[in-house]
Image (cartoon, rainbow, N blue to C red):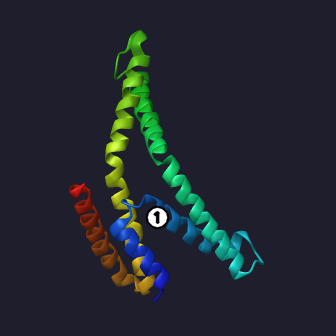
Amino acid sequence: MNILYLAAGILMLFFGRKALWMFVAIVGFLLGMKFGPSLLPGQTQSVILTVSLIAGLVGALLAVLLQKLAVGLAGMAAGGYIVYYLIQTNLIAAGQFQWLLILAGALLGALLAGSLFDWAMVFVTSACGAVLIVQGLNLNTSMSYWVIIGLLILGILAQGRIISRE
């Protein structure tokens, strides 16, 4: 049993969307621990641990500072691109006002990305938490799929309840 994986998994399963910075920090740390030895061959375990902690902290800081901006920009780009594609394939006849339709699509995309972001994060953090818990428990593969699905549903319900209270 790996207590670190269990603790990280439980935190992500139930509070991942609420504490996005924590989710990013945990993922950054775990990736550092997993790939650190390959990227920094010959380094001591304490160096790998330090680099992993720094990766987690930098990820958390960026998540806090850039979250809303990144989601908004991604939504704008996607919305504008979808309308642009529809205009180019002649599904929408826009004429000289195509830039206005692209702008409207970009704004709609930003609004949708902002409003659906919470539920996407609920799913991703619940799935990641479920996998970490299963890894922490060292379950065999035949049973682990069912446990992951059950934990995923539990995480979605728990975090969904938090969203409904807000």
Residue at 53% over, 59% down? 60
Q: Quadrant of residue 93?
A: top left
Q: Position of residue 53 (x, y in %)?
A: 61, 70
**Of 140 and 28, which appears nearest the observer?**
28
Residue at 46% over, 89% down? 1
From the viewer's perspective, tell me whether residue 34 is left or right of residue 84. right
Tell me how many marks there are. Answer: 1
Q: Quadrant of residue 137?
A: bottom left
Q: Give, as a three-letter code, the residue at label 1.
A: Met
The relative height of residue 140 versus residue 113 in the rendered view (above or below) is below
**Of 93 and 153, which appears nearest the observer?**
153
Q: Position of residue 139 (x, y in %)?
A: 40, 86
The relative height of residue 145 versus residue 165 in the rendered view (above or below) is below
Q: Quadrant of residue 33?
A: bottom right
Residue at 39% over, 36% down? 110
The C terminus - image quarter: bottom left
- At mark 1, the secondary structure is helix
User: Residue farthest to the right?
Assistant: 42
Residue at 43% over, 28% down? 85
Q: Which residue is mark 1?
A: 22
The relative height of residue 102 versus residue 122 in the rendered view (above or below) is above
The relative height of residue 58 versus residue 155 in the rendered view (above or below) is above
Q: Position of residue 38 (x, y in %)?
A: 70, 72
User: Residue farthest to the top?
Assistant: 96
Q: Position of residue 107 (x, y in %)?
A: 38, 30
Q: Callout 1 environment at 10 Å: few (<14), some (14 to 19), or many (20+)?
A: many
**Of 17 and 151, which appears nearest the observer?**
17
